[in-house]
Amino acid sequence: MKVNQSFRDVPKITTHVLQEMKLKHEKISMLTAYDYSFARILDGTGIDVILVGDSASNVMAGHSSTLPITLNEMIYHASSVVRAVRRALVVVDLPFGTYQGNSKEALNSAIRIMKESGADAVKLEGGREVLESVDRILSAGIPVMGHLGLTPQSIHKFGTYVVRATNKQEADKLVDDAHLLDNAGCFAIVLEKIPAKLGGQVTREIKIPTIGIGAGAEVDGQVLVLHDMLGITLDFSPRFLRRYHNLAEEIKGAVTSYIKDVKSTDFPNEKEQY
Ligand code: KIV
């Protein structure tokens, strides 16, 4: 796949393309985006999947967890991203409280996301406990991505963001959940912050692609939060995070120069006015 092609001639990434990538052992790249401008840049790079994650709750709104973000807010972020994207598969998180415990509400939430944002798929957290919701959403023809391991919407149940499934009981449950989601018809599963060996085991055992975030190298693809990998958010440094840039410093440098130029009346110069 050539990168930076014009919007018109790019073949769209579908869930079937991701399945073929798994079969061909071609790694899947996924990053988050929450707005039009970043999504447009990302789509032009050849990224395979753009996740409108509920991490928008932390990154965009400054909340300390993903719990407060609402369905309407997710739809706002998702529609902004969809307007920018031609090639990547756009997946949107179902926010906390819109799918757990009530499969009818889950279906309604997923339908609202698909109808009002134009996204390609939804993602939700959990295994057996959300299986009825997964089944119901899938039965409406909406592709579902699962999310196992560290599931940030359950932070109040676990009380900590430490590595998950480090003991046999939790690891067995995770493997069991992965099979359930695979057999139900999910098209991929995010595996967050689990031992690398377990990530590899799940990847080999199930038919659909696994996308890891802190799940080692033997998974089918990787995902990171865009603002973390670009160095915009600096207060979050888990071991799995590779920072590709220090954009916060670059932005500060540019803004400091702008302030200096305004104060010194260097800006605007003759050529910058009418
Ligand atoms: O919300 C999010 O950004 C996510 C990723 C961490 C996978 O779910």
Image: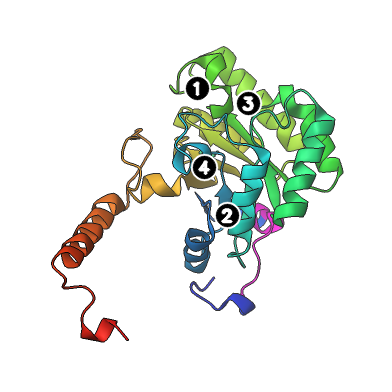
Provide residue 78's location: percent of width, then percent of height. 62, 52
From the viewer's perspective, is 25 left or right of 142?
left
Amino acid type, mark 2? Val
Disc 2 versus disc 3: nearer the observer: 2
Name which quarter of the figure residue 202 lies in.
top right
What range is drawn magenta here? 10-19
Secondary structure at badge 3 equals helix
Q: Is mark 4 within 8 Å of ligand 1?
A: yes
The disc at residue 49 is 2
Amino acid type, mark 3? Val
**Gap between marks 4 and 2, in whole Å?**
16 Å
- Name the quadrant of the C terminus: bottom left
Secondary structure at badge 2 equals strand
Ranked by sequence position, the earlier of labels 2 and 1 is: 2
Amino acid type, mark 4? Ala
Q: Which residue is mark 3?
A: 175
The disc at residue 164 is 1
Amino acid type, mark 1? Arg
Q: Which residue is mark 4?
A: 56
Examine the structure image and report whether residue 220 is included in the region drawn in magenta: no
**Gap between marks 2 and 1, in whole Å?**
24 Å
Looking at the image, which is closer to me, 86 or 178?
Answer: 86
